[in-house]
Image: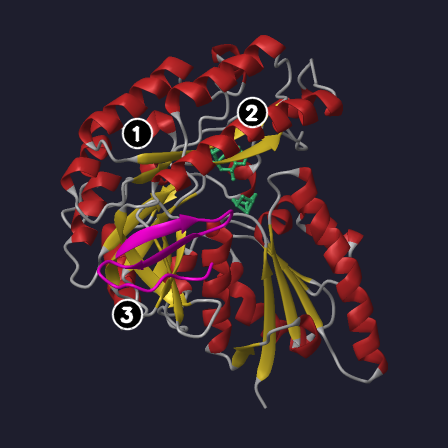
Amino acid sequence: MSKRLFIRTYGCQMNVYDSERIAESLAVHGWSRASSPEEADLVLLNTCHVREKAAEKVYSELGRLKRLRERRAAEGKELLLAVAGCVAQAEGAAMLERAPFVDFVVGPQAYHRLPELLARRERARGGQLATDFPVESKFDELPERSGEGRVSAYLSVQEGCDKFCTFCVVPYTRGAETSRPVRAVLEEARRLIELGARELVLLGQNVNAYHGEGPDGRSWSLARLLEALAELPGLVRLRYTTSHPKDMDEDLVRAHARIPQLAPYLHLPVQSGSDRVLAAMNRGYTADEYRRIVDRLRALRPDIALSSDFIVGFPGESEADFEATLRLVEDVGFAQAYSFKFSPRPGTPAAAMRGQIKESVKAERLARLQALLQAQADAFNRATVGRTLEVLIEGEGRYPGQLRGRTPYQQPVHLPADGLSPGDLALVTIVASHPHSLAGRRAGAERECRA
Ligand code: SAM
Ligand code: SF4
Ligand code: F3S
C-alpha cells in the first residue's frame, strides 16, 4: 500500500514551491498526497520564521500533531512528523530538543535529503536533522518536475539574500544569495509548460538580483532571462517576485515595455516612506528614489500596477516618519499591499535597537495604513469594472459552469465558462467588483456571473 503524505505550508511563495518539490521527490519513493493529517503516515510542516506569529503557529500545530501521533500509537500505528522551512533552519537541533517527538528537521537547502533521512529512520530511532547548506545543490538532486500541472506555476530561480535588512531573518534562514543557471531554469520552464503551465511566476527572495550563468558562460540578468523565457512556445504570461527596489535596474524597467508576456504588475516592497527609517532598516534607497523607480516604470509601461510590503512601528519610528509612509502611499497609489507590525526577530540587529515602539502604537498605525491601502485597492478594483482585460483561466469556479482566472493585475475573476477552459487566455469584460474577487463575462457573451 502506498504511504500517504500531508504537507502544511506557511510563509511565502518560495515555501509553496518547495512543498511541491518535496511532494514530488517523495512521490518517486511511493508517497502519495493525503488531504488531512488524519489520513497521513507522514505530516510535514513547511514553516516560516519571518514574524513571531508565524513561528509560534508551528509549535501550536506541533502540539496538535503530537496528540494525533499518540492516538495513532495507541492503535499500534505510526505517524511520522517532519518540520521543514525557515523555522527548521533557524532552530535546527534546538527544535529536536523542544519537540523531541519530531522525526525530521530539514532546512530549505537540504530537503532533497528527506528520502534518505526516511530510509535512515527505518533503520534507527531518533530525530534526523539536516539543516546544513550542503555543497551539492538541491536542484541537481531533485527529480524532474511532475505533479498535477498548474496553469500558473511557480519556478524558483534565485534563493537566499545578502541584503541583511536589519529586521529580517531571511539571510540567516535561506543563506547567501545564489542564482540557478539559465539552462536549468529553461529546462524546468519547458517541463512545466509540458505539464500545462501557461503562466510562470519566477521566484526569489531577491529575484531581481538574479545573475545566473548563461549558456554563453556569462552572467545573465533577470531581464535577459525573462526574454529567453518569453520565447518559449505555449507561455502566455510571465511574472516575477519578490523584487528589491535597489536591484530595479534600467534594463529590467525597460523589459516591462519590451516583453509583451510580462504582466503589467509588480510587487516592489518599500517598507517605509521615511528616509531615516529606511536607513535604519538598511534598505539602501530613499523614499524619493523609490518614487523615481515607479515614475520610470510608469513612463515606459503606463498601465503597470504596483503592490508593496510595509512595516509599521520599526524601532525609532516617530509619528512624522509614519506620516511620511502615508504620504508615499498617497503619492504612488498601490493596487494591493501587505502591511505588518514590526516583529522583533531573535538575532537580527533591529530586535536589539533602542526605541522599540509600544504595541498599541503599532496597532494604531497599522490600522491607519491599512485603511488607506484598502481604500486604494478597492478603488483600483472598482476602476476595472467595465474594462475588458486578458484573463488567464486557471480552473473551475465555485459553482458548476463557472471558471476562475486572473487579470494581468493578479485579481481573481469568476466568470461563466462560455466555451472556455483552464489554460485559455480570454478577453473578459469585468462586470462587478466584490470584496475578494471580480465578476466577469467573456467579451461578447451576454450572461453575467455569480461571485
Ligand atoms: N525580500 C523581500 C523584500 O526585500 O522586501 C521580502 C521578503 S520578507 C519574506 C516579506 C515581508 O515580510 C517583507 O517585505 C517585510 O515587509 C515583512 N517582514 C520581514 N521581516 C519582518 C519583521 N521582522 N517584522 C515585520 N515584518 C517583517
Ligand atoms: Fe529580508 Fe531585506 Fe533580504 Fe528582503 S531584501 S529577504 S527584507 S533581508
Ligand atoms: Fe517565511 Fe522563510 Fe519565506 S521566513 S517568508 S518562509 S523565506
Residue 166 has which mark? 2
Which residues are the magenta region? 428-451
Residue 248 has which mark? 1
Query: At x 57% / y 36%, what residue is drawn?
Result: 169
Residue type of the residue flagged with mark 2: Thr
Which residue does the numbered mark 3 point to in the structure image? 420
Badge 2 element: loop
Residue 27 left/right relative to 380: right
**Real-space CA distance between mark 2 and mark 1, rounded to the nearest whole angstrom:** 20 Å
Density class for disc 3 (Cα within 10 Å; few <14, some 14-19, many ≥20) is some
Mark 2 or mark 1, earlier in chain: 2
The picture places residue 182, in percent across and down from the top left corner, at 24, 51
Q: Nearer the viewer, residue 114 or 260?
A: 260
Quarter of the rendering containing residue 151:
bottom left
**Real-space CA distance between mark 2 and mark 3, rounded to the nearest whole angstrom:** 48 Å
The picture places residue 447, in percent across and down from the top left corner, at 33, 64
Q: Which of 278 and 198 is in front in this view?
A: 198
For the residues bearing labels 1 and 3, Cβ distance under 8 angstroms: no
Residue type of the residue flagged with mark 1: Met
Density class for disc 2 (Cα within 10 Å; few <14, some 14-19, many ≥20) is many
